[in-house]
Amino acid sequence: MRADRLVSLVLLLRQRGRMTADALARELEVSTRTVLRDIEALSAAGVPVYAERGRHGGFALLPGFRTELTGLNHDEALALLTAGSGRGEQVFGLGSALASAMRKVVDALPESHRATASDAARRILVEPETDLLPRRPVTEGVSGTTMTEIRRAVLTGHKLRIHYAATDQAPRWRTVDPIGLVTVRDRGYLLATRSGADRTYRLSRISAAEELPEPAQRPNAVDLNRVWRERCARFLSSDHITVLTRVTPERREDLLSTVVAVRAAEPDADGWLRLEVTFQDLRHAEWALWQLGTDAEALAPESLRTSLRDRAAAMATRYGDSS
């Protein structure tokens, strides 16, 4: 870990020039004292770091100093910088690693391409926090310590002990064999087996985790995309209802915030959106579409259209002219 931090420190000084110890500490997420120790270690190793005193002082590298890193062409670097410009820092607790990787990507470019690629990446925005449509789903959070334990067990192939709160149940400890991690629409999942049975755990419901020394019982190779598709298919086929609906673009996110899954989406002829979505049951579907009023229409199944029509008729009767 310290070796990676020393490289990141050198890259920061190369790309930004003079920086104070406090600024370096914030970037590297360590204490100022740790930064000063790292500066001393770099100097002892022959890296030309020097200090400038005074109000506008700080640490800097001698001009012309280069680190030996593998080069990338412009489009390769742009692809990585663009991928890292979204909310990748929120995925699986890899924020500091992403920041370090992006510094290395920029430094690996030839001098003539460095500014061009950085400027190009700033002109491409992936998955921003705000949207033209209202009520974007909020990313679910997991504590850094918990995420580190989960990620380490997945990658090392060890058993994992998690404190998990299933829906409508009190949290309790479970020991699982982790298979992989998946993120879908800002939600993270741990794919695992427990006593040989397939299990999928929402990361936001794991309050604590502990990597165990025992090896996990799992195959050496895995097609995570195939495993995820199979589990989704099983989940959607059990006690759920599939609904074909139309909705105005302005209420799309309101609808999506209530569904279990989205199977298909396409524009309709009149500017509305046509979606095939899954709800827990008929009652859930009726409740969700009723909230949208005339901004949505259930096209199928007929049982849902009937229940919504009967509900609307009952409301009309209740509030009809009483004179």
Image (spheres, rainbow, N blue to C red):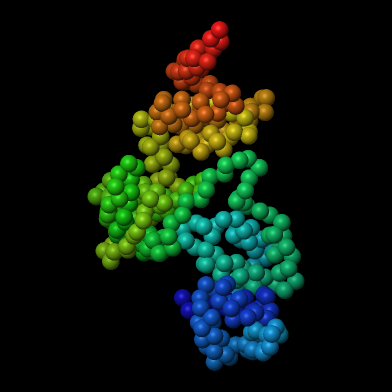
Q: Position of residue 105 (x, y in %)?
A: 62, 68
Height in image: 239 above or below 154? above
User: Residue reaching furthest left?
Assistant: 195
- Left or right of 288: which side holds 131? right
Q: Nearer the viewer, residue 314 or 263?
A: 314
Height in image: 152 above or below 68? above
Residue at horizontal 75%, vertical 71%?
112
Q: Position of residue 185 (x, y in %)?
A: 51, 46
Q: Nearer the viewer, residue 103 or 309?
A: 309
State the quadrant of the C terminus: top right
- Left or right of 152: which side holds 27? right
User: Residue reaching furthest front?
Assistant: 323
Q: Nearer the viewer, residue 86 or 293?
A: 293
Residue at horizontal 41%, vertical 25%?
282
Residue 242 visible here = no
Q: Position of residue 87 (x, y in %)?
A: 57, 56
Height in image: 227 above or below 285? below
Residue at horizontal 40%, vertical 48%?
202
Q: Position of residue 26 (x, y in %)?
A: 56, 73
Residue 280 placement: quadrant: top left
Residue 192 visible here = yes
Q: How many marks?
A: 0
Residue 268 placement: quadrant: top right
Residue at horizontal 51%, vertical 38%?
257
- Left or right of 258: which side holds 61? right
